[in-house]
Amino acid sequence: MKDQQEDYVLSPGRQLTEEEKKLLWRKPASHKASDEERRICKEVKRNWHRGEMKIANILLEGDAGSGKTQLAKALSADFGLPYTKVTCFADMDKTDIIGAILPVIPAERLKKIESAEQTALKALYESDGFRSTTDILMEALGLTEEQAALKMKHILKLASENAGGDGVEYRFYPSEIVRAYRKGYLLEIQEPTVIRDAAVLMALNSALELDGSLNLPTEVVRRHEDFIAVITTNRSYAGTRPLNEALRDRVQHTEKMDLPSKEIMIERAKAKTGYTDEKALDILAETIITLDKAARANAIKGVAGMRSYFYWADAVAEGSSVRESLYHKVIYKITTDEEEIKILEDALNDQDLPARLDELDYVKKN
């Protein structure tokens, strides 16, 4: 594949700021372009200036570990767009989609507030408006994305209780979604299927219209012409619901994400781990593929994916027993239920894979 930055950049004349350049994803040496990546790049580029036929909302749906986020990041590099993400959670509300209005607490009252909340509020007050509230709180307090969103709700309540009387100053802090929407970034929306509040989904649906807009308390923000939304969601994942029909309808291109071909698995493992024994990597890949098929066929919830393959190959490369590490790196990650393990072992036996794995161990020892 040719240099994708040259082939698929969507707005060659666009000048990114220094901060935006830092958000451009850089492909590691281990990255191998997949058929899905090539297909998306070609379709998006082909339709970019075709009005109503433009492709700017993409759905990647597949099992955990199938490479959805890696692909979303790769598209940032391909299209020349800054990458950012939002991870959805069950109790998201509209402030997580749009942002929040925060009253400024007078200095004398701020001193009486607990130190963690003081730190959070000062970080928000001193921000330049470039970053979202979630990003600011994650950095200031060392929180996860969901923890930062919940902390922001606590901060809003605290600030309202301590703002004082007349003449209170208010500031609006946009969400990560608004920042990407306004500035024209590639935004990965992870797991919107877990959202419980229908009003939140309605706000998200509205934002994803090609000519959509977001009604903020301070202004109406139009969708930037370069904004791309990449929705990534798992299939049959505990706690998820079917993807909202209205949201799915706003998607112009969908990829069903499964394990890549054995050849691509091997190439990625070699680049990722530095392990170059092709015969061993071939047998390990075949084992992963067999376990993946068996888990699906028997409705076993766990996943045998690329992450398991990389960690297993890395352990084997460092001298671990092939058969023993199979359980700790792959099978027990899928399930620890004895009956389900027996089903997976039977699937491996049907393909004579245990004997081939034992042969690898024998060759390693001798």
Image (tube, rainbow, N blue to C red):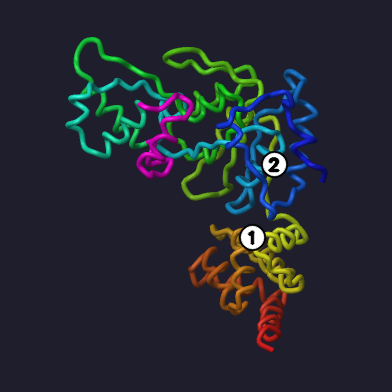
Query: Which label was assigned to residue 107?
Result: none
Tag nearer the camera, 2 or 1:
2
Q: Is residue 302 left or right of residue 358?
A: left
**Horizontal and vertical percent for residue 82?**
61, 33
Residue found at the far front of this picture: 18
Say which amino acid is labelled 1: Ala
Q: Is residue 274 above or below residue 176?
A: below
**Horizontal and vertical percent for residue 253?**
70, 34
Query: Which label was assigned to residue 255?
Result: 2
Q: Residue at x 64, y 37 (%)?
A: 59
Q: Quadrant of the C terminus?
A: bottom right
The residue segment tinted magenta is 126-149
Query: Which label was assigned to residue 297?
Result: 1
- Judge the density around disc 1: few (<14), some (14-19), many (≥20) Cα neighbours within 10 Å: few
**Lower sequence index among marks 2 and 1:** 2
Q: Is residue 145 above or below residue 258?
A: above
Q: Is residue 61 left or right of residue 121?
A: right
